[in-house]
Image: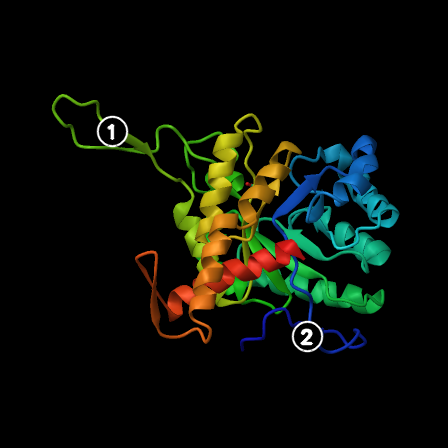
């Protein structure tokens, strides 16, 4: 069964309204914060004015002895902050970890009505989503949560990549998916020690040309997985995201990685450092010249059909649809 995008059917008896349409939101950057650190929590109200999504991270990068403090810190920051239009997400611990049940039961009980999305790591198949879906339905019903809490899966194991289409179709509660390049690299036994981005040794060397230096082009390690994820998401009305970029000192490479994902169909990326917020904002908001040209296409073909020439380039029904994607995004950014 294919359900309309952004519609959710509560599964538990006693859950609020049967159908609910959720607004389309701008989610260019999912900004990660470690909620166990008080100094970080104090900055969240200002941060919430600057980013599209604030995510309280409970999983990897949170020390084992700070797991409870991170969970309680997230509840505290969620209660203390008016998020307005900014999304509030949390990344829970893995479904087979000792913390996840308390993560969900405490957070939905305390701030279920403020929480938009649960990001779930290391999702391997639709069974993981079914489990989460039922658990969230039970907790929503118990705590009178008025809007459905959505699920965002991290694609970061070889098994998950194998099952990506079934994961995307697993529940009307699915919001989208992010590529997790660090865990995926480990799961695939890739020979890297990085969080996303390229590798200088993953390259193509051009044939020798006498008298010229060999041309060498570094290749994109993530192209295949991003394309596969984008197709699975688009086919199910979900949003796809690039995940983390770990080299905070290399803004240029971060921008290139974000842009490749944007061009391939992603809606946003994770930002782990404040310096990456501006990069994501720039990359995931459409370019002014691109929007101008897209508007010209829409104007030249008012009913979206036929063929016209613009600046020597043929436009038809299909480019009209591409132009509409760009103009629609520009409208949401401007709103
Ligand atoms: C993110 O969680 C990753 O593993 O890259
Ligand atoms: Mg990971």
Respond yes or no on whether mark 2 lies under 8 Å from ligand 1.
no
- In the rendered view, would you say 193 is above or below 222? above
Q: Residues within 10 Å of mark 1 (few under 14, many from 20)?
A: few
- Distance from disc 2 to disc 1, alpha carbons, whole Å, reads 55 Å
Task: Name the residue tied to disc 2.
Answer: 9
- The reply to whether discs 2 and 1 touch (Cβ–Cβ < 8 Å) is no
Residue 68 visible in image: no
Residue 142 position, x and y percent, is: 84, 67
- In the rendered view, would you say 14 is above or below 252? below
Of residues 314 and 266, which is closer to you in this image? 314
Residue 167 position, x and y percent, is: 53, 61
Quarter holding the N terminus?
A: bottom right
Q: Nearer the viewer, mark 2 or mark 1?
A: 1
Residue name at image x 47 percent, y 35 percent: 197
Residue 330 relative to residue 37: left or right: left
Q: Residue furthest right?
A: 80
Residue 212 relative to residue 60: left or right: left
Of residues 15 and 83, which is closer to you in this image? 83
Residue 212 visible in image: yes
Of residues 185 and 269, which is closer to you in this image? 269
Mark 2: secondary structure: loop
Residue 67 relative to residue 283: left or right: right
Instruction: Tell me which corner region of the image, top left, top right, bottom left or bottom right, holds residue 322.
Output: bottom left
Residue 185 position, x and y percent, is: 47, 39
Respond yes or no on whether mark 1 lies under 8 Å from ligand 1.
no
* Ligand 1 quarter of the rendering: top right
Instruction: Tell me which corner region of the image, top left, top right, bottom left or bottom right, holds residue 21.
Output: bottom right
Residue name at image x 56 percent, y 67 percent: 170
Task: Name the residue tied to disc 1.
Answer: 215
Q: Residues within 10 Å of mark 2 (few under 14, many from 20)?
A: some
- In the rendered view, would you say 143 is above or below 208? below
Residue 153 position, x and y percent, is: 59, 54
């Amino acid at each position: 069964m294919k359900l309309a995008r952004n519609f959710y059917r509560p599964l538990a008896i006693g859950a609020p309204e049967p159908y609910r349409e959720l607004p389309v939101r701008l989610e260019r950057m999912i900004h990660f914060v470690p909620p166990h650190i008080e100094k970080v929590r104090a900055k969240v109200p200002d941060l919430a004015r600057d980013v599209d999504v604030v995510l309280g991270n409970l999983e990897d990068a949170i020390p084992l002895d700070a797991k409870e403090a991170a969970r309680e810190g997230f509840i505290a920051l969620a209660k203390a902050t008016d998020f307005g239009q900014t999304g509030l997400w949390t990344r829970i611990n893995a479904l087979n970890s000792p913390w996840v049940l308390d993560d969900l039961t405490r957070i939905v009980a305390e701030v279920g009505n403020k929480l938009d999305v649960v990001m779930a790591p290391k999702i391997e198949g639709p069974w993981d989503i079914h489990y989460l879906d039922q658990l969230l339905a039970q907790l929503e019903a118990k705590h009178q949560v008025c809007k459905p809490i959505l699920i965002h899966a991290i694609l970061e194991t070889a098994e998950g990549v194998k099952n990506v289409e079934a994961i995307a179709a697993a529940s009307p509660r699915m919001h989208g998916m992010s590529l997790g390049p660090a865990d995926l690299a480990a799961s695939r036994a890739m020979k890297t020690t990085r969080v996303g981005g390229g590798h200088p040794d993953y390259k193509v060397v051009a044939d020798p040309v006498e008298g010229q230096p060999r041309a060498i082009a570094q290749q994109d390690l993530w192209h295949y997985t991003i394309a596969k994820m984008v197709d699975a998401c688009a086919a199910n009305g979900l949003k796809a995201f690039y995940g983390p970029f770990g080299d905070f000192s290399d803004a240029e490479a971060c921008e290139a990685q974000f842009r490749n994902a944007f061009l391939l169909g992603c809606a946003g990326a994770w930002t782990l450092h404040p310096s990456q917020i501006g990069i994501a904002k720039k990359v995931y908001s459409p370019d002014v010249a691109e929007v101008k040209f897209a508007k010209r296409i829409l104007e030249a073909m008012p009913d979206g059909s036929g063929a016209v020439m613009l600046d020597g380039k043929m436009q038809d029904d299909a480019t009209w649809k591409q132009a509409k994607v760009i103009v629609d995004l520009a409208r949401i950014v401007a709103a």
